[in-house]
Image: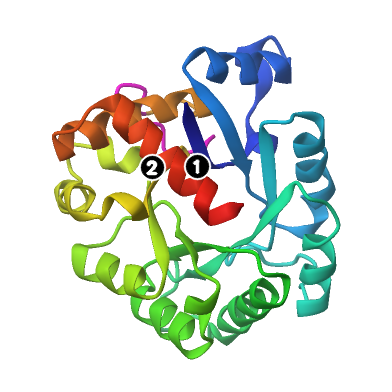
């Protein structure tokens, strides 16, 4: 069985699936995907995400506010904890973290993003649910805050990991898993492919981050959970392992982390 450990099912356009959500899920099931984590990015759409999880036994969800979401409801620790404990289908806090990709030195201060990140870490600790970390162009501050806030006590996953091996090692030392998305299939991602070879077997997860970042051979198209198979195949190739083994261990790691 495959597990798509990070997808945004509520954001996938259904026009390629006869406007039927069941067809989307069936396409993934046909490719061997047996479990999905539908990740929340703002509180305004949390009910939509939770409803999807409630409707399907194989779908779970998270609660959180994405680091780049502005002009949205700002979560408090209590908000997140209360929502996280509301239903057993909610298994994680996030996605949260830091994203400085579009920020220049002249832009406004990013303390608001760091404060939001700390709120999520505290909520994860209080609710005893793992963190889903988004880290883009902000690896030093992300790891620093995780360490300062004692996030290793709860752990989680560095989703859509795209950094080097030294960064991966530091994240693993902080009790985090490393999740590979379609980026690992890109020809240009040599450094990340090296990381995929090195990550310990018990810290490896795979994901689509759909509808974004479709893997080769579907690059450039809208992504979907069915395509996590291509991520598993590439990781297996890089590690000199079998596809079946990568599917198995990544699903077992998901089970251990989130349940």
Q: Quadrant of residue 127?
A: bottom right
| x then y, percent, for residue 244 | 32, 25
**Residue 21 on the magenta span:** no
Is there CB contact under 8 Å for labels 2 and 1? yes
Residue 209 vertical placement versus 227 (above, below):
below
Residue at image coords 35%, 70%: 171
Q: Nearer the viewer, residue 10 or 254?
A: 254
* Chain-order first, disc 2 or disc 1: 2
Q: Which disc is residue 181 wearing? A: 2
**Residue 214 on the magenta span:** yes
Residue at the far top: name it: 18
* Residue range highlighted in magenta: 210-219
Q: Quadrant of residue 55?
A: top right
Q: Nearer the viewer, residue 184 or 169?
A: 169
Residue at image coords 48%, 90%: 148
Left or right, 157 with respect to 217, comes to right
Label 2 SS: loop
Label 1 SS: loop
Q: Main secondary structure of the magenta part?
A: loop
Q: Which residue is mark 1?
A: 209
């Amino acid at each position: 069985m495959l597990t798509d450990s990070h997808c945004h099912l509520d954001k996938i356009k259904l026009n390629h699936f006869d406007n039927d959500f069941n067809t989307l899920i069936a396409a993934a099931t046909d490719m061997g995907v047996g479990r999905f984590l539908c990740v929340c990015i703002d509180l305004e759409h949390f009910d939509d995400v939770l409803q999807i999880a409630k409707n399907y036994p194989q779908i779970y969800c998270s609660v959180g506010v994405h680091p780049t979401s502005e002009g949205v409801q700002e979560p408090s620790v209590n908000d997140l904890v209360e929502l996280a404990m509301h239903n057993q289908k909610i298994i994680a806090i996030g996605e949260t973290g830091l994203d400085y990709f579009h920020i220049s030195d002249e832009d406004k201060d990013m303390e608001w993003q760091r404060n939001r990140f700390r709120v999520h870490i505290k909520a994860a600790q209080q609710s005893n649910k793992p963190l889903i970390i988004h880290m883009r162009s902000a690896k030093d501050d992300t790891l620093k805050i995780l360490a300062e806030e004692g996030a290793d006590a709860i752990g989680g996953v560095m989703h859509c990991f795209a950094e080097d091996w030294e960064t991966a090692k530091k994240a693993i030392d902080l009790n985090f898993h490393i999740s590979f998305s379609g980026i690992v299939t890109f020809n240009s991602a040599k450094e990340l492919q090296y990381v995929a070879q090195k990550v310990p077997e018990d810290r490896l997860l795979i994901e689509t981050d759909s509808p974004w970042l479709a893997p080769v051979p579907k690059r450039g198209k809208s992504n979907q959970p069915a395509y996590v198979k291509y991520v598993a195949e590439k990781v297996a190739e890089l590690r000199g392992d079998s596809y079946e083994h990568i599917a198995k261990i990544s699903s077992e790691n998901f089970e251990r982390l989130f349940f």
